[in-house]
Amino acid sequence: MLALITGGSGSGKSEYAEELICSLGDSRVYLATMKVSGEEGFTRIMRHLRQREGRGFLTVEKETAIADITIPPEANVLLEDMGNLLANTMFDPERKDGGIIVDNIIKDVEALNARCRNLVIVTNDVFSGGDAYGEETVDYMKNLALINRRIAGMADLAAEISCGLADILKGEI
């Protein structure tokens, strides 16, 4: 199963995704894509570590190019999160993808999905805020929207989380 879990900041999407992946079996991989930056980033990572404590996750940290991670056969993978993966890819000074960011990330998702039992992807709703953004931010938002739409199209389950509650947009649990 491929699942896409979306929501705004503080919506409960990470907790929901973790509960979902825990319900799918014992072999659990947490694919962490966040680059640690500053006190806020460190605090967020520590909160997520406490959340997962004692739940049997193998944590794999990979900021870009997720297709080649090492996972156990038949693993249930939680990718946390697509927004970080996209930002890391877009703003990587070593990037050599020729600007085909969306297609390359989708190919990586497809390759990872083919190697695991279940893949649950957490993504962000960043489209409800203000309207005075710089060009780089607008490009980021457009790319994330494209990625989210393409993954939702491939997904067996798509859910939007708000206030800790799930609105199932596609499929069923």
Image (tube, rainbow, N blue to C red):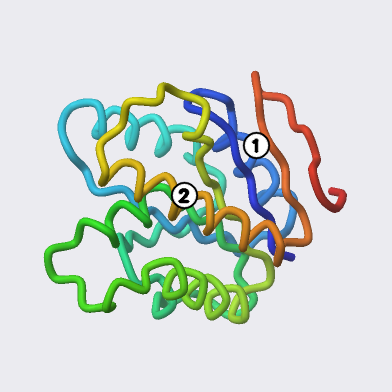
Secondary structure found at label 1: helix
Give the amino acid at mark 1: Tyr
Specify few, some or many for label 1: CA neighbours under 10 Å numbering under 14, 14-19, or 20 or more.
Answer: many
The residue that appears at 31% across and 52% down in the rendered structure is 87
The residue lying toward the viewer, choosing from 151 and 71, is 151
Residue named by callout 1:
16
Give the amino acid at mark 2: Glu
**Left or right, residue 59 beside residue 19:** left
Q: Distance between the Cα atoms at labels 2 and 1?
A: 12 Å
Which of the 4 image quarters holds residue 1? Answer: bottom right
The residue that appears at 63% across and 45% down in the rendered structure is 5
Any mark on residue 169, and which?
Answer: none
The residue lying furthest to the left in this view is: 93
The residue lying toward the viewer, choosing from 76 and 125, is 125
The image shows residue 161, relative to residue 158, as above or below, that is: above
The residue lying toward the viewer, choosing from 152 and 58, is 152
**Left or right, residue 25 beside residue 97:** right
The residue that appears at 27% across and 78% down in the rendered structure is 98
Residue named by callout 2:
80
